[in-house]
């Protein structure tokens, strides 16, 4: 029976636990990033102007996209090894192996960026090749970002992960304000501030993790074995999903116009925080998942309750929030809120299943799911965007995320059946 008082009491008690505090901390850092990102956008657009701001955005997007391919599954493998490690010494040795592997990946990424700089201008009709060559050695920090995120997830160092997420953007804001008052913000200075903030935060976090470089051959061998059996499957699935992630906006700009891309992006920014809390909770208990036989019912129940309240609130108040914050000029975003809120609901609901199966080394299942979700996303966008424009893209997102939730539940139930069969054979 529904008992509001009991639910409120349970939520208060949950908030007081270590898991609740860590989830709040990580979610708070992600919300802070969204808010600080708006401030950096204001500073950059006003200081650089449309042309230079476009160059800066293009360079950062290009580097971030290319860096996605420079992981090869090692970091996902390391996350799981750290999650099942039963003492601090093993954790530190695993981190040491990951740091050494990341150094090699980072240098390879810098070389790839340097080589890409000779072709990028002809490929995209830009003039950024010289800039890429100059910063090519500094961009080696990008692979370290994902490595640290995965290490903090596997070791349950959520406080450090939260600080690591926020610190570079705060560094950038302070630096940019100083430069604007004393000099002039340029693309080069903006990139230097961006990269130097990530570099400093990365060094501080790595030192605080106290990596051990003893017995490197053994630990790198373990990472290699785990990557072949698990990490590479996650990596290929991640590449497939990322490659279709931005298709909705690209299709909207192609089949409709860029104005509707703006409306769509605005509606997405309102619904994005929904799934962030679900993901924060799942990351926080990832290490615990590795030692559990099933997902606690309370995790699924309260995640559902949070997401349902978000959908109801957005549908009821979304129009008024848009008019209040962005004026009547953006009221065209309102019809997009419901389908994108449903997409956020489904995306938030599958986070615990995704993290749980990852913690239990179901890399092939994760890869297969990612490929099927990418296919569904591509098909639905190709069909619906030409017909209904941005609304079609929003509906396509809802269908794809609903399909994803069904897949993760299917694989989770498959895992439970295998577990029951294993127990029966004992």
Image: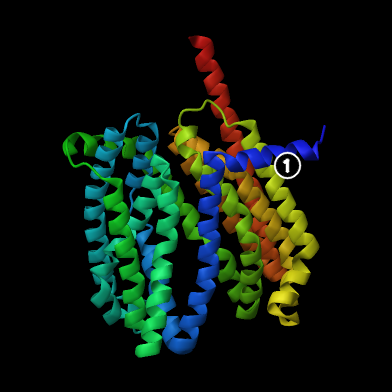
Task: Tell me if mark 1 has few (under 14), some (14-19) or many (20+) residues whose alpha carbon lies within 10 angstroms of its own.
Answer: few
Can residue 130 be seen at all in this image of the molecule? yes
Residue 343, compared with residue 409, is above or below; it is below
Please state if 130 lies on the left or on the right of 241 as rendered: left
| Closer to us: 172 or 392 | 172
Element type at mark 1 = helix
Name which residue lies at 45% across and 32% down. Answer: 290
Q: Tell which residue pokes out farthest to the right in this image.
A: 1
In what quadrant of the picture does the N terminus appear?
top right
Which of the 4 image quadrants contains residue 313? bottom right
| Closer to us: 325 or 391 | 325
Please state if 410 lies on the left or on the right of 328 as rendered: left
Which of the 4 image quadrants contains residue 86? top left
Name which residue lies at 54% across and 11% down. Answer: 424
Please state if 109 lies on the left or on the right of 234 as rendered: left
Name which residue lies at 40% across and 80% down. Answer: 176
Residue 68, compared with residue 85, is above or below; it is below
Residue 64 point in image, percent of width and height: 39, 65
Name which residue lies at 53% across and 25% down. Answer: 293
Residue 279 point in image, percent of width and height: 55, 48
Specify the color scheme.
Answer: rainbow
Q: Which residue is mark 1?
A: 8
């Amino acid at each position: 029976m529904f008992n509001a008082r009991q639910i409120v009491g349970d939520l208060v008690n949950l908030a007081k636990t270590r898991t609740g505090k860590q989830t709040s901390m990580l979610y708070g850092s992600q919300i802070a990033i969204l808010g600080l990102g708006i401030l950096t956008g204001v500073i950059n657009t006003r200081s650089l102007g449309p042309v230079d701001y476009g160059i800066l955005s293009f360079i950062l997007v290009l580097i971030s996209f290319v860096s996605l391919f420079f992981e090869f599954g090692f970091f996902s493998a390391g996350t799981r090894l750290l999650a099942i490690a039963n003492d601090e010494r093993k954790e530190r040795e695993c981190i040491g192996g990951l740091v050494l592997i990341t150094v090699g990946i980072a240098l390879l990424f810098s070389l790839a960026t340097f080589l890409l700089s000779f072709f990028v201008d002809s490929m995209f009709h830009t003039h950024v090749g010289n800039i890429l060559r100059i910063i090519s050695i500094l961009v080696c920090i990008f692979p370290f970002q994902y490595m640290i995120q995965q290490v903090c997830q596997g070791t349950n160092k959520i406080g450090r992960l939260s600080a690591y997420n926020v610190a570079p953007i705060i560094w950038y804001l302070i630096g940019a304000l100083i430069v604007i008052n004393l000099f002039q913000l340029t693309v080069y200075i903006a990139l230097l501030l961006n990269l130097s903030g990530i570099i400093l935060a990365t060094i501080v976090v790595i030192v605080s993790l106290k990596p051990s470089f003893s017995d490197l051959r053994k630990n790198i061998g373990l990472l290699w074995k785990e990557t072949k059996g698990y990490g590479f499957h996650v990596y290929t699935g991640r590449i497939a999903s990322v490659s279709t992630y931005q298709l909705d906006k690209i299709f909207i700009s192609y089949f409709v116009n860029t104005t509707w891309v703006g409306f769509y992006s605005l509606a997405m920014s309102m619904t994005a925080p929904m799934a962030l809390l679900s993901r924060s909770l799942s990351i926080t208990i990832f290490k615990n998942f590795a030692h559990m036989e099933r997902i606690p019912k309370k995790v699924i129940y309260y995640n559902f309750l949070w997401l349902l309240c978000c959908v109801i609130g957005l549908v009821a108040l979304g129009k008024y929030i848009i008019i209040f914050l962005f004026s009547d000029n953006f009221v065209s975003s309102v019809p997009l809120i419901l389908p994108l809120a449903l997409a956020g609901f489904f995306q938030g609901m599958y986070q615990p299943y995704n993290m749980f199966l990852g913690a239990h080394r179901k890399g092939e299942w994760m890869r297969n799911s990612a490929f099927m979700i990418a296919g569904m996303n591509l098909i639905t966008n190709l069909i619906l965007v030409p017909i209904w424009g941005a609304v079609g893209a929003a509906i396509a997102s809802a269908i794809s995320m609903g399909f994803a939730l069904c897949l993760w539940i299917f694989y989770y139930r498959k895992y439970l059946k295998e577990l029951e069969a294993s127990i029966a054979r004992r």
